[in-house]
Image (cartoon, helix red, strand yellow):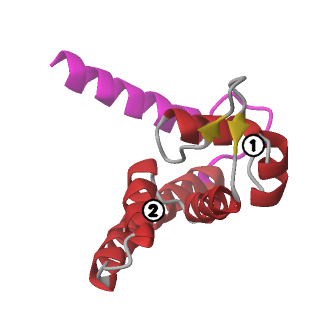
Amino acid sequence: MNIGDVATRSGLPAKTIRYYEDIGLVKPLRSANGYRMFHASDVHKLAFLGRARALGFSIEDCRGLIKLYEDTDRESAEVKQIAEEHLSRIDDKIAELIEMRATLATLVDACAGDHRPDCPILADLASKQQSLHLKETG
């Protein structure tokens, strides 16, 4: 199969497939004229990677998951550890987003949104920038 066929079957753009090849996640064979030659197993691996990336796994996590997937002697505990670490990172991001949302909601509520120039949103952004600048220079 050529890269266009593989892209259609795996659901990944050709550019992503080339990137995955560049970083060693997939290793298609090359024909004498240099064209990539993919097999059904490559399509399956690319679909696997696409699903893992859609769940937010990092490239390094994907590298580990593919290695474990291909290892029939693997222990599921290794797979679970990677997934648990990723889940923990997701939980951390969710907590950060909740905090961001609460702060922004408070600022939006405090802003009159009228014709006057006073704006607590801009004042807060400026005060945060000034405190960051003071930390950097202090």
**For the residues bearing labels 1 and 2, Cβ distance under 8 angstroms:** no
Who's the residue at 56% across and 52% down the image? 104
In this picture, residue 36 sits left or right of residue 129: right
Name of the residue lying farthest toward the bottom: 76
> What type is the residue that disc 2 sits on?
Ile
Who's the residue at 69% across and 36% down the image? 36
Residue 92 visible in the current orientation? no
Q: Quadrant of residue 65?
A: bottom left
Q: Which residues are magenta?
A: 110-138
Q: Quadrant of residue 9?
A: bottom right
- Say which element carries label 2: helix
Spatial CA distance of label 1 from label 2 is: 52 Å
- Say which element carries label 1: loop
129 versus 25 height, above or below: above
Which percent across, then down, holds residue 43? 69, 58
Q: Quadrant of the C terminus?
A: top left
Q: What residue does disc 2 label?
A: 66
Which percent across, then down, holds residue 41? 63, 62
Residue 132 sits inside the magenta stretch: yes
Which percent across, then down, holds residue 135? 21, 26
123 versus 54 height, above or below: above
In this picture, residue 124 sits left or right of residue 48: left
Q: What residue does disc 1 label?
A: 113
105 versus 7 height, above or below: below
Check disc 2: other Cα within 10 Å, few if <14, some if 14-19, many if 20+. some
Which percent across, then down, holds residue 137? 20, 15
Residue 61 visible in the current orientation? yes
> What type is the residue that disc 1 sits on?
Gly
